[in-house]
Image (cartoon, rainbow, N blue to C red):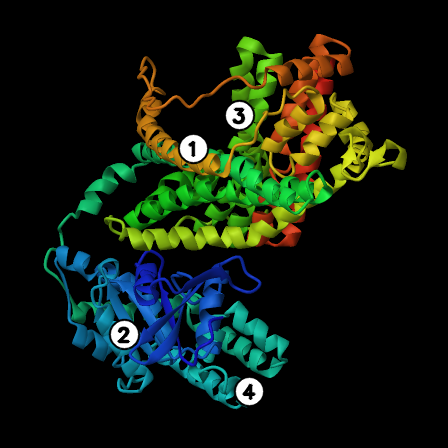
Amino acid sequence: MIRSSLTIALAGNPNVGKSTIFNALTGAQQHVGNWPGKTVEKREGKTRIQDREIAVVDLPGTYSLAAQSAEEIITRDFIMHEASSVVVVVVDASNLERNLYFVTQILELEVPAILVLNMSDAARSRGIQIDRQLLSQMLGGIPVIETVGSRQTGIDQLKQTILDVIDCSHPQQIIRVDYGEVLENAIAALQTAVSAEPAIGHTYPARWVAIKLLENDEDMCSKLETANYQSLLHATQQTIEQLGADFSDDIETLIADRRYRFVGRVVEQAVVRANTGLETRSDKLDRIVAHRVWGVLIFLLLMWLVFQFTANVSAPFVDWIDGVLSGPITHWTAAIVDAVGLEETWVEALLIDGVLAGVGGVLVFVPVLLFLFFTIAILEDSGYMARAALVMDGVMHAIGLPGKSFLPMIVGFGCTVPAIYATRTIEDEDDRRLTGFLLPFMSCGARLPVYTVFAAAFFGANAGNLIFGMYLLGIAVALTTGFVLKHTVYREKLTLPLVLELPPYRVPTTLRNVWRQVWNRTQDFIHNAATIILMSSIVIWLLLALPARTNRGSFNAVQAGDSVFGSISETIAPALAPAGFGSWKTAGSLLTGLIAKEAIIGTMNQIYVQDTGPAPETEPSFRDDVVTIFESLGETGILIVQETVNIMPRTLNMLPGVSIAEARFVDDGEADNTTALEQSLTSAFIQTAGSTAKGKLAALAFNVFVLLYIPCMASVAAMRHEFGTRWMLYQVVYTVFLAWLVSLFVYQGGLLLGLG
């Protein structure tokens, strides 16, 4: 928590532009994390108004304060217990009736508040005029400010109003919704009972507590039961039973109905709609974009573009970072070590093979995350994400998930790590956890090199069939797992119909605000994933450097098979033998694959291919390295443009009969560097299996294992960060067991069918 004597909270429904107000107030002074004990994003910042520094907390977007979700409980508890100086309630000026329901619940908390009519320009364009003075009067004197957050219009007035409310220059009355004579009598009786308990009365407004008790609010009832207020709970139950005899509807519905009546009267008097029957541009676009059929096709097309942008456009930048780390940075590190006389020692090996490998394991994911979060920020700011959830809801509902779960799954084909973070677009915590649980089965781009090498080595002209089959198998396993979990672990939880607000389409906010969103989310990953990846890399290096027996070598001078790593691999190997790949070399490759799936091929190159070729006669100079860095950076920029341009032909080439040549601005120098490895793998697998057919079957089972077991340490770190240690462990155990079981089924089933 940012320490400040003054704190303001931003609250409001989703898709009302609350984040743009937060960005306008705080600028670059922001911090993004998670709420303690929750996987809900927490955004904090600082703003300076005149001579005062004020902390700003952006509360989760929610439609009510009914305490039925983590977001609602967080918002309510923060407003009640964190001593907010003022609550700034942001609403969509063009949809005031819907948003004011939440505003009435805030005002019932009896806290100082400001009402911000955001996107007021969009409201005026739709012929909506709001009498701010009358609106303020009907809401108890709450200040009403018009803003356009994306343009920072009205922000200065908002800042001054915040100071006025803090200094009590804006006196506010306590508004009370009229719930009708019968309910009001019941509220008054319970209010008296609550006031008689000083501990409660000093913590919460007594009338608000009485209303919550009549609504049978689970959070409030649980707190009172824990504090042993049995008499108050008993009086509440008696009151509810008496009211049940007077009304056919439940009390919560009656209270909600009275709130909506109050909101209706406010809107009727304070809002004038000049063009009641005017069809907006958003309405016209939604005829196609939100259509049951065309909407799905548009969504799939956009997700394909997101996937291309995330996986392919970022790839040159990923390669550049990897090249700089493995080239110049490694050369410089080795030169420094040599200068202090530690060349060819364990220190040099630790720094290069341990620390640099760990840092690289973090940094190579950064471009992927940057590109992903950039596309998501654009889609969110444009108003499209709500439509995406709407059109895909029916498709995902079949396995008990909301439409928003589809986006992280698509992203998972590029990289599991950003896909896990992309689950933050899913509001329901159970749906979010389940979606995260399924993501490792989406075949990420890091697995592709493994498929490619094995496909070329064992399947020749049918290599494409293996790769395509791996992707299909991953999807099938994810859907099956989701279906089973929804009918076992989550069988008591109903998948409710999707209810959401469709904001108007709008041009995304300024590039500065988009970049701020992107960087805040990316640095959150860096801070939380760096440690576990770095430590894992160092541990793997240490195991490779330690000899398993003293007569097999010395520290940092031991063959991989004689190291502790080789010994551990040999111990694990028998468990993999029934699946056809029970050598210590394959087991060891799978172990290093825990760091990153690309490491599988690197490890196999080390332990399968003995002759790696002659070392270079001379190391490049510092000047050569610097020139290489900048030259490769320029080429990387050209390749990024090339990949961006090629998105269109690649997309059109998916249509039958269409064949458009892709742009090639530079020769990327792709060459077949895996021939020796392919030959070594073919010989090793065939020799171990005993025949060519069995070798192919074992290779297929190995690829299935790579597809289904733990993606990488970065994804494990992201899973732990987002969903907690226990859920992460569940996933690790499940993926390893499932990978073993399915690969066993593939190999042994193939033998029974005579394929071996």
- Left or right of 367? Residue 238 is right
> 465 or 589: which is nearer to us?
589
In terms of secondary structure, where does tag 4 sit? helix
Label 2 sits on residue: 159
Label 4 sits on residue: 199
Q: Give residue 526's position: percent from left, percent from top.
A: 52, 51
Q: Give residue 57's position: percent from left, percent from top.
A: 41, 68
- Total tally of numbered discs in the picture: 4
- Give me the C-alpha separation between circle 4 and circle 3: 59 Å
Q: Do labels 4 and 2 touch, CB within 8 Å? A: no
- Regarding residue 197, the answer to whether it shows in the image is no
Q: Quadrant of residue 168?
A: bottom left
Going from N to C along the chain, the mark reached first, 1 or 3, is 1
Q: Give residue 398's position: percent from left, percent from top.
A: 48, 37
Q: Could you tell me which residue is drawn at 50 percent across and 69 percent down?
A: 217
For badge 3, the amino acid type reads: Leu
For badge 4, the amino acid type reads: Ala
- Left or right of 337? Residue 662 is left
- Give me the C-alpha separation between circle 1 and circle 3: 27 Å
Q: Could you tell me which residue is drawn at 32 percent across and 34 percent down?
A: 298
Which-is-in-front pick, marks 4 and 3? 3
Which-is-in-front pick, marks 2 and 1? 1
For badge 1, the amino acid type reads: Pro
